[in-house]
Image (cartoon, rainbow, N blue to C red):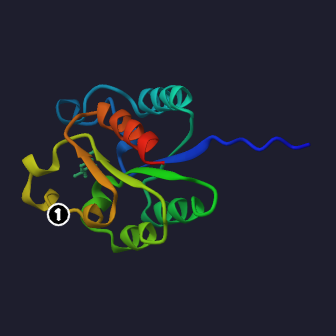
Amino acid sequence: MIQESSEAVVMVIHGPNLNMLGKREPEIYGRETLEDIDRGLEDLGGRLGLDVKTYQTNHEGCMVEAIQATIGNHQGIIINPAAYTHTSVAVRDALLLVDFPVIEVHLSNIYRREPFRHKSMISDIVSGVISGFGAKGYRLALRALAELI
Ligand code: DQA
């Protein structure tokens, strides 16, 4: 008999330039690398009973495809669309397709920064937003998802 796993699968999607974390404006984004963040999330996911997958892209269309690919086989998304947060109708439309919890994360507090960062194209359609807690924000988001799923 094939044993089906009951672990919920969560996709963590990181947008453009987040592959440079550690080197990129560390006074704003901190010193943890994306690799550190992703490994930490996988570990925490194991403790919370969540199977955590991670993906980073610098391309808007790839982000849309990654969101679409979660449909039917994932139970939650954590997304930091980075600069696309402020511009992408395509990312918003893709997120409107999913019917499970989505949490928007930003390392920095986007509301304490330049006015063009105050507008998010997705905040009004996601389950919740965590902004301004650095890398810890991803871990808070994963704990929130564990409760929501
Ligand atoms: C960011 C904030 C965005 O304004 C910026 O373009 C990023 C990162 C954050 O995590 O604080 O690339 O999403």
What's the residue type where badge 1 is placed?
Answer: Lys
Residue drawn where x is 33% and y is 35% of the image: 140
Describe residue 35's horizontal placement relative to residue 126 as left or right.
right
Place residue 4 in its image quadrant: top right
- Judge left or right: residue 19 versus residue 46: left
Q: How far across and how far down the image is residue 67, in percent?
A: 50, 61
Point out residue 12 in the picture as x, y percentages from the top left corner. Answer: 47, 46
Q: Closest to the observer: 47 or 65?
A: 47
Give the residue displayed 32% in from the left and 69% down from the top: 88
Q: Is residue 131 above or below residue 62?
A: above
Left or right of 96? Residue 48 is right
**Relative to 128, is 1 above or below?**
above
List the residue tagged with mark 1.
119
Disc 1 beta carbon < 8 A from ligand 1?
no
Question: Does dot 1 land on a helix, a strand or a loop?
Answer: loop
Name the residue: 48% across, 67% down: 61
Left or right side of 69 for 12: left
Q: Position of residue 52 (x, y in %)?
A: 55, 39
Q: Residue furthest right?
A: 1
Q: How many marks?
A: 1
Q: Residue at x 52, y 25 (%)?
A: 47
81 or 43: nearer the viewer: 43
65 in relation to 56, above or below:
below
> In the rendered view of the protein, which quadrant contains the N terminus?
top right
Quarter occupied by residue 120: bottom left
Give the class, few, some or many, for how many residues have Cα within 10 Å of label 1's Cα (few <14, many ≥20): few
Image x and y of residue 70, in percent: 57, 58
